[in-house]
Amino acid sequence: MNIISCEKLTKTYGSAAAPVHALQEVSLAFEQGSFTAITGKSGSGKSTLLHLLSGLDRPTSGQVIYQGKNLFSYNDNQLSVLRRRRFGFVFQSYNLVRELTAQENILLPVMLDGRSPDEAHIGHLIELLGIEDRLSHLPGAMSGGQQQRVCIARALANKPAILFADEPTGNLDGKTGREVLSLMRTVGKELGITLIMVTHDITVAEQAERVIRLEDGQVVEDSGAVKL
Amino acid sequence: MKRLTLNRISAASIRANRKTYISLAVGIVLAVFFATAVSVFCYGIFDSLQQHIRRMVGDTDCVIYDEPDLTDEQLRQSGLFLNLGRVVVLAAVKDSGVCLGYADDSGAQIINQGCREGRLPEKAGEVAIEKSALEKLRLEAGIGDTVTWKIQPVDGTEIERSFTIVGFLNEQSGNLNGENWYWSLGREMRWPSVIVSPEERFSDGRPAIHRVAEYAPLVNYTKVCEHHSLENAVVLAVSRAEGQVRSEDPADYDRSVFVGGMGMMLILGASLLLCTGIGIASAMESVLAAKTEEIGMLRAVGATRRQIRRIFGRDAWLLSAIALPLGFGLGLAAVWLLCRIQSEQMYFAAPIWLLLPVAVVSLVCVFLSSALPLWRASRQLPMGVLRDTAMLRRARAFKSRSSFPSTRLIAGRQLRLHPWRQVGAMLMVVASLLCAALVGEIVYDAVGELARSRPVAFKLYRTTYDRDEFAGQLMYHFADSKSKETLSDGDLAQLRATPYVEEASIEGECIVMLQLPDAALPSYLTGVGAAQGADAEAVLDAMGGRYLLREESDPEPSMDNDPASLEAWNSYAVYQKMRAAQDAFSLSGKPVRIRLRVADLENADDSDRIAEGKVDLAAIDAGEQILVYAPKLYIKDTGDLEGLRYVATTDERLPGRQMAVLENDWFHAGMTLELTQLLYDGGFPGDENDYNSYLTAFSRMKRRNAAPTVGAVLTGTPLSYPTELCLLTTEKGAAAMGFELAHLNEVSIYLTGDVDMETERALEEQIGRIAMRGNMELRNGLQWWREEKESIRAVFLLFGGMMLLFFTVAVAMQVSGTSRRIRADARMIGTLRAVGADEKALQEVYRLPTILTTAAGTVLAIALYIAVALWIHSSMVNVKANMSVIVGGMVVLGLLCALCCLAGLRVRLKTVLDRSIVENIRDL
């Protein structure tokens, strides 16, 4: 069953005189609980695709269908609610709020939603990610790997339906990268989360169930295309 | 290819970050504007005052009156004076107090003698005269006319002379006349208001020679008085703040006026500079905060601290180069505009020697304001900047929470990390609210005053006093004589008959005897109790005193020279007069002298001072009733070496040791007062303190009796009459009781309706001439009314403008500060949006600092205002009413400020939210 799909998704940057087509009429569908890796060279449009799928950016044309409804027909507040309840996002550059401690960063989506955190779930995540001793630290006082783990914990704190990850291992050394990826897979499996990850690392992509390769904003290879 | 210089880098940086630098530029413009405006304004006021004083008294520092034994040589050799001149009084016009004389060249130069019309006399038979003197002589004459006067030379024989008027002098004699301070100078030695030629000679008599002098450096009035050659001389100092002679060293008073006035302006200027300085520092801090990574990168690639300071400091200097002329121009334009509005109070002058230091001070202010953030930025280590270790250090105290209101926590943490970021904006809120409070005070008071008082078109004040009447009062204690140098009944009738004059209301006084019951003398009137000591009598001389307690069998006191013996002797002397009066008029009770004041009770708002009874104007006008002002009196020790005491109607805020409190224990509404007025007409008893001499004198005096009932007893602190016991009635009331108004102090003239300017001028001239006859000064109430309104408008505009400016700057600083933070926080905003924060949540992050800043500024401003208001208006009764209204206004303005800031924040945040999250995060 498809959880999210996109139709003729196009994103163009720059002026009308010198347009840059980051994405050109891409249509894809993702099954619930699947693990998909989107690969491609730098500038191929993979991050743009991820941003559009997760509603972080608006397309020039085309639509993203989530649970039967176009994501961009939601207003900003509805999209915000969707992002904090149903989506999780792991950024390449972590993007933690520097005034908040690791624990507070993890709890941020829950608190923004005005709910009480599922302490068992959060505790499990923290244990799984091995950041128990870093909870009271500010992001500036943590290493890149630790910040990325906090970022993953934050993305998973609300038990999202889909976890979007933009080069989550890009800033990490090989060993840490592998650990982080393994963690994401483990947690994803446990919670039945759909994992859509952007990477240019072939070895990382190989661990995915489905690999989509982009080139010049178009899908040139899809190892497990599903019907729209 | 152009060479890359630091200036070009800075210029490019300013161009690229136009919006960021606008607040910095505004700060610099404001700093220069305030420094220029305040300095030029102060200079204009100071110089205008000095010129005004010069017209009144020239450069005179002190006057030595009629010391024929002292030679000019002696005075010069004393080393006390830089310049010395003579003003010679030759004679007086008989029975007028108008004196004739001349000044030598040095004297004329020192007093700045000059004519407003015509010229000074050049030969015998010519005179130049002050217009007020002409009026006192009740003459209508112009230049070229001949006048004939009976002349009384000083210590000489009366003669008649004719003179040709050749000029009208500037009015100076009233300012330099020493008679009000030393009665011994005599009417014939008054400062000459008629200038004759030095060639003028009279048959006999001697010239009275007054000396005018300018002090040598480091000399003051005290030094002059203490000099052995002048120990017994009559010397008066000239107050440069008042333009009048004074009998004590005016240096402190002048300084206090100068320091008070100029100090207030300088404090205001310094506060403004401080505010703008903080604004500049705050803007600079934000500019540098936004460039933290750039600074770290530059430090990492080898830029030295000095280079960092030069690169980023140059921005401020380049902005200064643009902002300085703008600030200068605006400051000068503002003062010029103010001078146009207030042309009579000040004029516009901006000498280069004043502007240069202002420029330097402004530059120093800009430099200091930008130097601190620059110094701090350049002190950081490269990785320290990149990792923001300073922030980590400050954040050590943060406790991690497992449950929190996310946006408020972020806002709170930001405030704790950057507590000084909001100070500039907060100070601007304080400044704008304080200006608003000032505007409120001005408007509240002005509206109150304008609404309260019935407009007095013209008011006549008495300026000099007839020494004979006081001498007589001292001599007879219970008797009074009608002042000669005052408006006559004919003058008053002429005033009342003047076209457009509806009413001429009189304020004056006379002395009456109040008969007390023989037994049980009220302590309030005797003023002496066992615990109060003899000193009280000296203070309450006018009310009563020790003589009342004296018995006939008490021995005659000795005439020793110590204060106690003098007191005893005085009370013995008054006792003798009392006995003489009792016997002359067969009085059964003991009399006290009491002042009967004639006042405009219809227009006086005394309702809140009525202790008992009620004011029935009809009964007062009919002479059936009278009012008694009987305040609670506090007798205080001033604590000086001479052991002087003073009386006040309030206790709380006056310094000094309280010695006694006198409370009304006798006057009550409904009681009948036995009053007698004794009027003498010149001549003193042959033998002072001799019972028989007084008995004869009192028997010959005119005597008027009345027995009105007390309509109401007033108490509290009056605004319109002195703080002593007195009886109050109206002009009609006094006439109905048969009392003669011996001393006329004020005449208030009300007109039938509005008059045009031409009529007003004609009336002013006509009434002014009548005023001069009675040594009275005329105040044009209509002009005052207009000037007051103009002045209120100008002050309202000035402070209202400043308030608006501060308000705008406060809002702009907050909004631009928040904008800068929003811009710097774009990535955080993107992150928060990515994890599900909606617009409301994001607003909350920035709303809290804005609200807290405005609230803190409002609270601080209100606290400052209340403190200052209580301090300044400590003696004002209605201060609480003012304060509650003004504090309310300040709160409303604070709320308005917060709302404006929040609206600005909303607009700014909207522009960020219109961008996609990806754009926020990547700061595209």
Image (spheres, coloured by chain):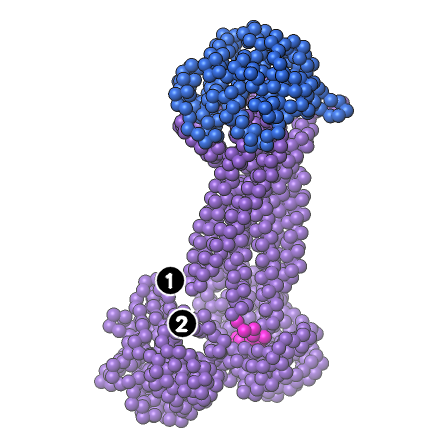
Chain colours: A blue, B purple
Give the magenta-colored segment's residue range.
B453-466
Q: Is residue B456 magenta?
A: yes
Q: Is residue B437 visible?
A: yes
Foreground mark, 2 or 1?
A: 2
Q: Is residue B116 above or below residue B30?
A: below
In the foreground, B591 or B853: B853
> x, y (%) of residue B754?
63, 75
User: Helix or strand or loop: what does disc 1 sit on?
Assistant: loop
Q: Is residue B234 magenta?
A: no
Q: Quadrant of residue B739?
A: bottom left
In the foreground, A163 or B122: A163
Label 1 crowd bin: few (<14), some (14–19), many (20+), radius 10 Å = some
The residue tagged 2 is B609
Q: Is residue A84 above or below residue B678?
A: above
Left or right: residue B97 versus residue A23 is left
Q: Is residue B647 above or below residue B97?
A: above
> x, y (%) of residue B612?
36, 76
> x, y (%) of residue B99?
57, 79
Q: Chain of mark 1?
A: B
Q: Is residue B804 above or below residue B663?
A: above
Residue B654: assigned label: 1
Residue sitting at x 46%, y 16%: A191
Q: Is residue B779 visible?
A: no
> x, y (%) of residue A197?
56, 14
In the foreground, B769 or A226: A226
In the foreground, B131 or B835: B835
Q: Quadrant of residue B789?
A: bottom right
Quadrant in the picture for the N terminus of chain B: top right
Residue sitting at x 42%, y 31%: B404
Residue sitting at x 42%, y 64%: B877
